[in-house]
Image (cartoon, grey):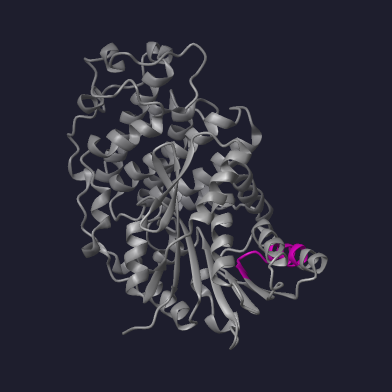
Amino acid sequence: MAQEDGASSVTSSPLQFFPWMSISPGYGSPYPWLRELKSEERGLYLIHLLLACANHVAAGSVENANISLEQISHLASADGDTMQRIAAYFTEALADKILKKGWPGLHRALTCTKKSLVSEEILVQRLFFELFPFLKLAYVITNQAIIEAMEGEKMVHIIDLNSFEPAQWINLLQTLSARPEGPPHLRITGICEQKEVLEQMALRLTEEAEKLDIPFQFNPIVSKLEDLDIESLRVKTGEALAVSSVLQLHTLLAADDEMLKRNSPSASKNPNCNHFQRALQINKNQRTLGEWLEKDLVHVCGASPDSALSPLSLAPSPKMGSFLSALWGLSPKLMVISEQESNHNSSTLMERVTEALNFYAALFDCLESTVSRASIERHKVEKMLFGEEIKNIIACEGIDRKERHEKLEKWILRLELAGFGRVPLSYHGMLQASRLLQSYGYDGYKIKEENGCLVICWHSRPLFSVSAWRFRRYD
């Protein structure tokens, strides 16, 4: 993470400046000297304030949570350094949580006019595609897997479960046009909630296919994934079928919320944990806030998000199960799934807060290293995409909580139980992805192989996974 001008690395505990201080309801507004803290020191203090506030919210202590929010507001800033920006969006999410639970009428009154326009949603998705390499890498890896699986096939049908970016399929069309045996007849079924997005997709892809002289058909389906009618996919006999899901499958877990009553250990049951004592062990050589969070934050409050990775924790998911069974019934030759590599689907608030701090600290670090703090594009992505996701993870429950990201181990187990067999991603796909990183000059990003799948990392922190699957008959 880039440091502020004049900020130096912490050579001893930043908490030596306030060893007498504890996070308590009676502390009041921060003293003026807190504003003079260096970036790293302020970042640590904000983390502790956020965790204390989340503990108060989880315990239903509105008065104490309000005092914590007041303290944080003096240090957080949507235009500041990484931790100041994160703090701004996490405090907004925690405040939203308080209002939703205690004053639902007030919450509805304050948010009834805050409806994002379709054009804004499209814009922020495009900005995410441009500012980060994650989607580009997922597309390259997915396309290479499709090319390899569809070798020699004359009729290819691709179902795109999150159809919004034509660049992926334009690249595939160009690659197929160069096939030694000639291009296949290609049909793409695109699924998206926004009709405008699908219309633009159809136009761009049809133009490219005509230019390359590839027989092509685009089948648009305006639908949410949970409402998708499998029959509308119109899979035909003789077609080689591939399914592409980019950051989409996790949304189906929201429909299963009532059956996901997991009793995982919660930090909210341990409100007296000593945040500051743990922070004294900070390693001065860690390069980014995200790295510190990854190593230490989970232990700060005794949360155990990895408990969700146990096979025994895979609770019944009728909606997800029926959807995967329906896809299995289509006998796909290949299915490629990209998902966020984090556990944001815990039933307890504190586990979601700690995991979200881990995950989004790394994403904010990515932007801090490559984009100016004054960038309008950066601000839009942080506010309209990450900020809204953080709010959804922390403030929402039940069917409203769509951002239910889960880790690769859990997706592997879920897909194997649904009857799919894993397809190891090829070395050539990984090589293409590595070359893409080099060509764009993306420093700090890494790709590693894990159980035949690929994981995209920011430094050592895994952020997104890509896995490939095929139809497998039950024995």
Residue drawn at (40%, 12%) of the image: 32
Quadrant in the rendering for residue 409: bottom left
Q: How many marks?
A: 0
Q: Nearer the viewer, residue 54 or 263?
A: 263
Quadrant in the rendering for residue 131: top right
Does residue 203 show up magenta in the picture?
yes
Does residue 418 show up magenta in the picture?
no
From the viewer's perspective, tell me whether residue 184 is left or right of residue 258. right
User: Is 346 placed above or below 258 here?
Assistant: above
Quadrant in the rendering for residue 396: bottom left
Q: Nearer the viewer, residue 321 or 410?
A: 410
The image position of residue 60, as x and y in percent, is 27, 45
Residues shaded magenta: 190-205
The image position of residue 326, as x and y in percent, is 45, 80
From the viewer's perspective, tell me whether residue 136 is left or right of residue 414. right
- In the rendered image, the quadrant that contains the C terminus is bottom left
Q: Residue furthest front?
A: 180
Residue drawn at (44%, 43%) of the image: 457
The image position of residue 245, as x and y in percent, is 52, 64
Any part of residue 12 in sight: yes
From the viewer's perspective, tell me whether residue 257 is left or right of residue 149. left
Most common secondary structure along the magenta stretch: helix
Q: Residue furthest bottom?
A: 237
User: Is 258 placed above or below 54 here?
Assistant: below
Q: Residue furthest right?
A: 211
The image position of residue 257, as x and y in percent, is 35, 65
